[in-house]
Amino acid sequence: MTLKHTKIKFPIWQYLNQPLFSRDTKLVLNPQRFVLIWRLQLLERCWTKECDAKGPQQH
């Protein structure tokens, strides 16, 4: 079994659609900083997502 590593590409659409005048979020103009923040938020969303088990859990 081989593992295929996929690299997350630059989220161009999310970068271009940042809210300009929002009090909740800040506009990030630096693309490198935006990617760092976006990846951290993606990781946080993945951690909080519930996982559906396909059968009884074993302890």
Image (cartoon, rainbow, N blue to C red):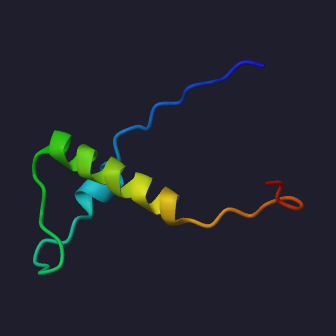
Q: Is residue 53 above or below residue 24?
A: above
Q: Is residue 29 left or right of residue 6?
A: left
Image location (x, y in percent) of residue 15: 25, 54
Q: Quadrant of the N terminus?
A: top right
**At 74% across and 64% down in the image, what residue appears?**
52
Residue 8 picture location, percent across and down: 44, 38
* 7 in relation to 58, above or below: above
View extreme (front): residue = 59
20, above or below 51, in the image: below
Quarter of the image that includes the C terminus: bottom right
Tell me which corner region of the image, top left, top right, bottom left or bottom right, holds residue 18: bottom left
Residue with the most extreme bottom position: 23
Quadrant of residue 5 within the rendered picture: top right
What residue do we see at 12% from left, 71% from top?
Answer: 20
State the count of labels.
0
Q: Is 57 in front, or is 50?
A: 57
Q: Is residue 43 left or right of residue 36?
A: right
Outermost residue toward the right in this view: 55
Q: Residue at x 10, y 52 (%)?
A: 29
5 or 11, which is in the foreground?
A: 5
- Identified at 34% across, 41% down, the residue is 10
Q: Position of residue 31 (x, y in %)?
A: 17, 43
